[in-house]
Image (cartoon, coloured by chain):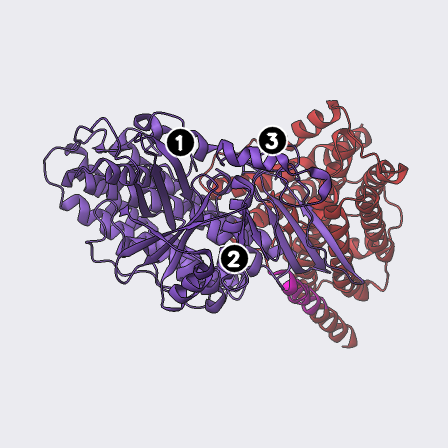
Chain colours: A purple, B red
Amino acid sequence: MKLNLKQLSSEERTARLKAALDAGDRLGLITSIDGDQLIMLLLSPGKRSIDCYETPVAGGTYKSATAMVPQAHWFERTTWDMFGLVPEGHPRLKRTHLHEPYTLTSPPLSHERRKAIEKTIQPESGDRRHAGDRSYHFLGVEGQGVYEIPVGPIHAGIIEPGHFRFSCYGEIILNLEIRLGYVHRGIEKRLSEVPWQRGRFVAEAAASDMPVANSLAHATAVEYLLQIEVPRLALYLRSIALEIERIAMHLSDLGGLAGDIGFLAIASSMGRLRGVALRMGELLSGNRLMRGFICPGGVVSASMRVAEEIAQLARQLKQELKPVVAFYMDNQVAVDRMEGVGVVRSSLAREFGLVGVAARASGDRYDCRNYWNHGAYPNVDLEPANETSGDVFARAKVRISEIETSLKLLINFLDDLKEGSFLVSLPDRLEANSSSVAIVESHRGELIHFIHTDARGEIQRYCIKDASVNNWTALAIAVRNNVVADFPLCNKSFSLSYSGHDL
Amino acid sequence: MHLILQYCLFAFAIFILPPSLLGLIRKVKARLQNRTGAPIWQPILDLAKLLQKRETVSNTASWVFRFAAATNASLALYLAVVLPWISPRPYAGPCDLFMVIYILAAMRFFTILAAMDTGSAFGAFAASREATLSFLVEPAAVLSLAALAIPSQSSDLIVIFSNSVDHYPALWLLSGTAFLLASMVELSRMPIDDPTTHLELTMVHEAMILEASAGNLALFEFANAVKLAVLFGLTSQCYLHALLNLGTVSPFANVCLSLGSLLAVAAGVGAFESVAVKLYWRKAPEFIAYALTLALLACIVTLGASLK
């Protein structure tokens, strides 16, 4: 939705954030536009309203909110990395994106004036504000018998890079520190450079296993700035695409979970079923992953003929899924492997602002589809999945229940399709000096795209917050006191994106 | 002429059969997952490929690292020569069951040394897991064979397996199953370790040989394949003894039976592995307890029978 930037003084900032969270609101995002201010997005799902606060930052430092609001910790680290804004009093201020090999001496997203200020700070001073200081220190755990296992950034198998540093005592994980940023490609910067009409191709590449969610968030945010209405058919087709993506990815994650406990029969069955979901995507968009399907103004193509065929496939998938899920969930050893492993208690889930599957497995019923405008949502009757035990098993059950919900929604949407236009022509310019935000429930959870335009109507700042940003910390919490051998299982149960975080 | 044929068959049994058994297990798993799967002889091609590659050795590794694979392969071949795991076998010397157990332990010892020698974190923790498993599984392996030794009044496995006078099917069945379960642990197969996984943090055996490459890796893989063939071979011999009195069948039938039962055991393991779930690490002792209980039961059965 369109945002009105409200001014908030730096003294009030933490208190306002804390009060809002205590009242049941959610922290959406903390970032900056050009390094002169902090932007804070507070979401009130109950009221379906979003408050956006702008706090001027003088001298490149501000008071960190992390001590009071733990979930701010990652945002503050990233803002330091990208804008050089130092959160005073942050307990573990480390780089998130820019590693040792980066030779930049100024923060990449701050404007020229701030960059000039940064350059005056001498590296010898030992001042951590110096943007060229890329040192990184892992949290050390000491004691007799404690040892470290460094894993990654390059892993076995075709997965993205990320470094995990385990401090272990025997087989028990005492602490896990996650270091990301290896696939930082400068997506956000690039989105403010390319003409906005072409931005969708960049935006949907932010994380390649969720092109629908990213292109939908992008299109929705851009449409607010263009002030156009999207035809009903396009909204429905967007929701259909989003649900197909969710089904495909949840199936793939369930198969991955089965693979990690060596349950090969289920792993390969899930792979086959995912193929059915991808087939639906291909029928809908001509592309199995539905890349390039959603664009600002609507969708690129629509064929009513395939609707019945997709619904047929959805019903077939529903039938074929049943015995596979039953075989999976009735296996006592499989359940035993997942139950009580990788627990995130609901208090911690709230404190660290978890979203998506991880949140709903820990007793939080937050599902963006019930609150925020995207596709045909939120005007759909949808019961969010809800588990409370917060373990790997709960996350698996949430995925299964969400596949069922999505199949039901998908069939309803397909039945409800009405002929009509699916694409409107776009105005030439974005509205100048304004901000908009789109919130989408991707298969990982809450995905936020925030756009701010300058006086000429060009995109000045494009910020993407993937669900992984919130949830990577949850993984570090979940694996504590579990055995090392269960880490891959915990990791898979969160199924987080490296590139979605690194951007 | 007869002897030459025997040697040829035996050479086939120790060089071609073991990798093919691995291939068979993989094939069964693939078919049960609706995949075509690689051909059964694929592991042989893999070994040939590995032998052609150039080796990379970690700078921190000492001679122990390369010595271990060769030692393991030799010990595995020695076991294959002396143990009565398949018919025909041209060699018929003594073969004490305790010696067999400790040759297996020696193989493990060298693998563990090699794993720790490179100084990688994966190798070290896998070595610690292997050591833990090995002392848990040793009693089960010893007892299952010792139960067989009671009626023959000898600890020589050749004597035990050629004893056709005292025929107790129940004993062979119990001992064979106990030995099979112990072998699954010994060979790092499901449900203790998943041989197909790519996740280093969950591995036992595979993580120990992560640093090995080319010929060195080929030797490790070959040694493991031979060990698998020998242990499954002994199991299949136990099952054959349970089904019929082997003293009464012709040599040719014996060859066919031993080969067939070995293939059947491997296929059975493949089928089991495609529906099994890897156990939680701390539950591994429970699985080993099954093997131990069966072995104890076999001991009780045979002691009871000999008291009559």
Q: Which residues are magenta?
A: B280-295
Residue B277: in magenta span: no
**CA gap, disc 3 to disc 1?**
20 Å
Q: Is residue B296 visible?
A: yes
Residue B283: in magenta span: yes
The answer to whether mark 2 and mark 3 are in CB contact below 8 A is: no
* Residue depicted at 90% across the width and 37% down the height: B63
Task: Name the chain under label 1.
Answer: A
**CA gap, disc 2 to disc 1?**
29 Å
Judging by the rendered image, the residue that carries numbered circle 2 is A474
Please state which amino acid type lies under the numbered disc 2.
Ala
- Mark 2 closeness class: few <14, some 14–19, many ≥20 residues within 10 Å: many
Please state which amino acid type lies under the numbered disc 3.
Leu
The residue lying furthest to the left in this view is A419
Pick the quarter of the image with the N terminus of chain B: top right
The reply to whether label 2 and label 3 mark residues of one chain is yes
* Residue depicted at 28% across the width and 32% down the height: A293
Pick the quarter of the image with the C terminus of chain B: bottom right
Find numbered disc 1 in the image and state the secondary structure of the residue it sits on: helix
Please state which amino acid type lies under the numbered disc 1.
Leu
Nearest to the observer: residue A58 or residue B191: A58
Checking the image for residue A104, the label placed there is: 3
Query: Residue B193 placed where, x, y %?
Result: 64, 52
- In this rendering, would B285 be left or right of A38? right
Nearest to the observer: residue B29 or residue A43: A43
Q: Nearer the viewer, mark 2 or mark 3?
A: 3
The reply to whether label 3 and label 1 mark residues of one chain is yes
- Mark 1 closeness class: few <14, some 14–19, many ≥20 residues within 10 Å: many
Checking the image for residue B226, the label placed there is: none
Total marks drawn?
A: 3
Query: Residue A428 placed where, x, y %?
Result: 23, 26
- In this rendering, would A425 be left or right of A42? left
